[in-house]
Image: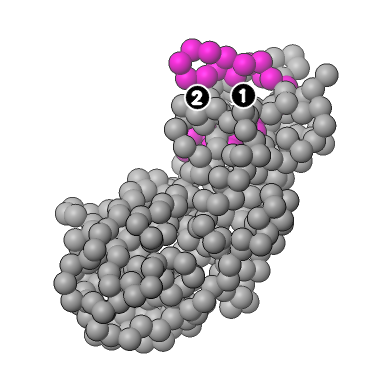
C-alpha cells in the first residue's frame, strides 16, 4: 500500500520535499497551496525584454543544493554565474568600495566570508526556473487555493482539514509553511510549546525594479550594487543587468532597490534617491514594486534550540516534519535542503 503524504505549502521547500517523496516507489504525495501560485517569495517576471526578480535573485555559488536539484531536473546547464562582482557603500556623498563580508552583514545575508567570496549563481530564466520545472515534474500533484487549516492525529496518521470544508486522511505530513502559521497549527495538533515558533519575527520589505536606457545613467558603474550606510529611504541597490547576464536588452539598465515599508510610492522614492546617487537623467521606462509584508525571518537567540525541541516533540506524534525558511536557514539553498531532509525524515519512519 502506498504511503500517503500531504505537503502543506508550495514554496521551494515544499516543492523540494514533494520532489524527494515523488521519486520514491509506493509514495502518493499531494502538495496543497493556499495561494494561486507556487514559489513563495520566489517571483520572476518577464517585462518586455527584461527579466525581473521580485524576491531572491540568486544563491551562494558554494552551496550545492540547487545545482544538485537542477541536475536531477535536467536543467543543470541553465545555471549561470555572477558577472559583476563587488559592492560599494553609499556614505551620503560618494560610493566607496566595501568589503564583501560587511556588505553581506548589512544586507542580512547569513554566510561566512569564504562563501560570500565565491559569489552568487542563478538561472538563465531567473530563480523561478527550478520552481516551474518542479511544477512540471509534479504535474497533477500540486493543488492551488487549497490551504491546510488544521490537522488532528489518528491511530495511524493524520486527518487534515482543508480550507473550504474538505479533508484528507493521510499517513504523514510535511509542513512547509512559515513559522508564524506552522507554530499555531502544530500547537493545536498536540505539539506542546510549538506556538513559540509563531513568534519568529519576519521583517517586512519592499523591492522595486526600475528600467532605464543606459544613456540615462551619467556615472560609470562598477560591481554588482551598493548598500546605504544610514538608510533613510533605500537600504541597497543591485545593478541587476550587470550582476547576471540576460536581465536587460542591449543598451538598457535594470536596477533593483530595497526599501523598508513607508508612506508614499516606493517606485518614486527609489527613483528619486537613485537619480541623485547614480546621476540618472529622466524618468524610468517602467517600474515594478513587490511588497513583502512578512519577508525573510530573522532568528532570535536560541532559535536552533527551539526548532530542535519542537522536532523532538513531533516524534511523539504520527509522522510529521517541518521545513522552510523559518527553521533551518532563510536562503533558497537552505530551503531546498530543509525540504529534502524533511521528506527523508518521513521516509525513515
Q: Residue at x 57, y 14 (%)?
A: 167
Residue 68 location, x and y as percent? 71, 57
Q: Nearer the viewer, residue 261 or 23?
A: 23
Relative vertical location of residue 197 with respect to residue 220 in this rendering, above or below: above
Residue 189 location, x and y as percent? 59, 23
Residue 179 location, x and y as percent? 52, 40
Relative vertical location of residue 305 with respect to residue 121 in this rendering, above or below: above
Q: Name the mark on residue 146.
A: 2
Q: Which residues are magenta?
A: 158-182
Q: Is residue 188 magenta?
A: no
Q: Is residue 175 magenta?
A: yes
Q: Residue at x 80, y 35 (%)?
A: 24
How far apart are the alpha carbons under marks 2 and 1? 23 Å
Q: Which residue, given by chain and number where applicable, does mark 1 sit on?
A: 190
Residue 174 location, x and y as percent? 65, 33
Q: Helix, strand or loop at disc 1?
A: loop
Decide: few, some or many residues near mark 1? Use Cα within 10 Å; few <14, some 14-19, many ≥20: some
Q: Residue at x 22, y 65 (%)?
A: 284
Question: In the drawing, does residue 27 fall left or right of residue 245?
Answer: right
Question: In the drawing, does residue 285 fall left or right of residue 173?
Answer: left
Mark 2–mark 1 CB contact (< 8 Å): no
Q: Nearer the viewer, mark 2 or mark 1?
A: 2
Q: Helix, strand or loop at disc 2?
A: loop
Q: Nearer the viewer, residue 249 or 334?
A: 249
Residue 292 in sight: yes
Amino acid at each position: 500500500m502506498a504511503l500517503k503524504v500531504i505537503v502543506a505549502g508550495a514554496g521551494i521547500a515544499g516543492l523540494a520535499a514533494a520532489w524527494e517523496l515523488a521519486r520514491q516507489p509506493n509514495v502518493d504525495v499531494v502538495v496543497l497551496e493556499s495561494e494561486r501560485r507556487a514559489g513563495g517569495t520566489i517571483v520572476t517576471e518577464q517585462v518586455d525584454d527584461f527579466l525581473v526578480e521580485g524576491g531572491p535573485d540568486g544563491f551562494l555559488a558554494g552551496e550545492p543544493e540547487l545545482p544538485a536539484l537542477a541536475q536531477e531536473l535536467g536543467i543543470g546547464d541553465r545555471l549561470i554565474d555572477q558577472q559583476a562582482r563587488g559592492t560599494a557603500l553609499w556614505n551620503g556623498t560618494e560610493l566607496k568600495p566595501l568589503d564583501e563580508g560587511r556588505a553581506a552583514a548589512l544586507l542580512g545575508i547569513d554566510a561566512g566570508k569564504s562563501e560570500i567570496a565565491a559569489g552568487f549563481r542563478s538561472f538563465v530564466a531567473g530563480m523561478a526556473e527550478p520552481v516551474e520545472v518542479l511544477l512540471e515534474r509534479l504535474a497533477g500533484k500540486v493543488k492551488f487555493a487549497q490551504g491546510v487549516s488544521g490537522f488532528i492525529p489518528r491511530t495511524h496518521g493524520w486527518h487534515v482539514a482543508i480550507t473550504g470544508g474538505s479533508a484528507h486522511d493521510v499517513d504523514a505530513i510535511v509542513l512547509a509553511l512559515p513559522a508564524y502559521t506552522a507554530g499555531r497549527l502544530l500547537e493545536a495538533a498536540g505539539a506542546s510549546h510549538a506556538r513559540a515558533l509563531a513568534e519568529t519575527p519576519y521583517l517586512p520589505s519592499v523591492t522595486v525594479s526600475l528600467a532605464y536606457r543606459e544613456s540615462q545613467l551619467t556615472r560609470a558603474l562598477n560591481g554588482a550594487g551598493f548598500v546605504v550606510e544610514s538608510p533613510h529611504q533605500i537600504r541597497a541597490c543591485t545593478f541587476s543587468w550587470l550582476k547576471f547576464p540576460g536581465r536587460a536588452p542591449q543598451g538598457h539598465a535594470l536596477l533593483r532597490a530595497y526599501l523598508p515599508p513607508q508612506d508614499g510610492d516606493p517606485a518614486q522614492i527609489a527613483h528619486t534617491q537613485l537619480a541623485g546617487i547614480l546621476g540618472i537623467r529622466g524618468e524610468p521606462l517602467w517600474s515594478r514594486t513587490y511588497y513583502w509584508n512578512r519577508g525573510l525571518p530573522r532568528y532570535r537567540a536560541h532559535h536552533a534550540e527551539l526548532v530542535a525541541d519542537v522536532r523532538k516533540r513531533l516524534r511523539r506524534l504520527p509522522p510529521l516534519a517541518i521545513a522552510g525558511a523559518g527553521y533551518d536557514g532563510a536562503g533558497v539553498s537552505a530551503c531546498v535542503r530543509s525540504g529534502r531532509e524533511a521528506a527523508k525524515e518521513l521516509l525513515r519512519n
